[in-house]
Image: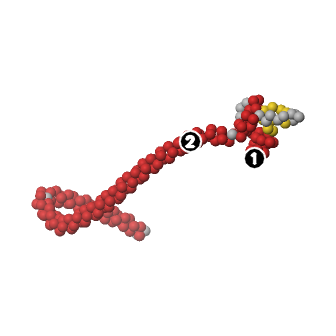
């Protein structure tokens, strides 16, 4: 009989409580494992004791390899979280500033509307006071106009006279035309 130096894949899978496929995947994932730690005995592939230890510690080794990666990822995540928190703080401050500016704008707009309303009422009040005095001012202006326009009254009178003459001349021409048309019509009656 041949003495077994190592373990077969079946024996190793039972010992590690893994499937044969999982053992084969581990063997294939380690570079140079088949050439260094396996040999064929009849129809079976045997793994030497050092290879068995490597496969048994495969999970620990992978975890140790992943651990620095996880630590780096965790550190990266923490940095990202800190950056995002700072950005949120900045955004919160910006929102607070915008809200304060909006409140100030609304208060200013309300004050402006109130001031405009007050000024409008004041203008209406002054307009009411000015209307009676404007009527007396208009009367005094009319008196001044009549005094200053005494020279212009002759010009206006002459202008009106010319207009009246033109109207009289036009009406005379119209009457003459009507008379001629009647005369023409009456001439036909004689025949």
- Residue 70 image-quadrant placement: top right
**Badge 1: residue crowd in 10 Å (few <14, some 14–19, many ≥20):** few
Residue at x 17%, y 60% (from the top left corner): 157
Apparent side of residue 171 relative to residue 79 in the rendered image (left or right): left
**In the depicted view, which residue is nearer to us: 156 or 116?**
116
Residue 17's label in the rendered image is 1
Q: How many marks do you count on the picture?
A: 2
Residue 87 or 156: which is nearer the viewer?
87
For discs 2 and 1, the disc positioned in front in the rendered view: 1
Residue at point 25%, 64% (across, down):
118
Q: Can residue 186 be seen in this view?
A: yes
Q: Which residue lies furthest to the bottom in this view?
A: 189
Q: Which residue lies furthest to the right in this view?
A: 1
Q: Which residue is drawn at 23% across and 64% down?
A: 122
Q: Which quadrant holds residue 113?
A: bottom left
| Residue furthest left as drawn | 147
- On the image, the x and y values in percent for residue 131 come to 20, 67
Which residue is more in the foreground, 99 or 93? 93
Q: Name the quarter where the C terminus is drawn.
A: bottom left
Left or right, residue 56 beside residue 166:
right
Name the residue tied to disc 2. 71
The mark nearer the N terminus, 2 or 1, is 1
Mark 1 lies on a secondary structure that is loop
Q: In this view, does 32 lie to the left or right of 142?
A: right
Q: Give the quarter of the figure containing the N terminus.
A: top right
Give SS at disc 2.
helix
Along the horizontal axis of the image, is 150 left or right of 50? Answer: left
Residue 165 shows up from this direction:
no
Q: Residues within 10 Å of mark 2 (few under 14, many from 20)?
A: few
Question: Residue 119: x percent and y percent?
Answer: 25, 62
Image location of residue 127, percent across then percent down: 21, 65
């Amino acid at each position: 009989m041949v003495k077994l130096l190592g373990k077969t894949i079946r024996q190793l899978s039972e010992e590690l409580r893994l499937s044969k496929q999982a053992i084969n995947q581990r063997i294939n994932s380690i570079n140079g494992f088949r050439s260094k730690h396996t040999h064929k005995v009849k129809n079976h592939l045997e793994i030497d004791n050092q290879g068995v230890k490597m496969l048994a510690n495969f999970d620990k080794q992978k975890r140790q390899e992943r651990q620095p990666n996880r630590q780096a990822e965790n550190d990266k995540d923490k940095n990202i979280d800190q950056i995002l928190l700072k950005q949120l703080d900045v955004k919160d401050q910006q929102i607070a500033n915008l809200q304060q500016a909006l409140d100030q704008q609304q208060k200013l707009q309300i004050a402006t509307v109130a001031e405009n309303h007050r000024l409008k009422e004041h203008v209406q009040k002054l307009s009411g006071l000015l209307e009676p005095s404007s009527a007396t001012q208009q009367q005094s202006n009319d008196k001044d106009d009549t005094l200053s326009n005494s020279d212009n009254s002759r010009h206006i009178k002459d202008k009106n006279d010319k207009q009246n003459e033109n109207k009289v001349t036009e009406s005379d021409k119209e009457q003459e035309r009507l008379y001629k048309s009647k005369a023409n019509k009456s001439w036909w009656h004689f025949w």
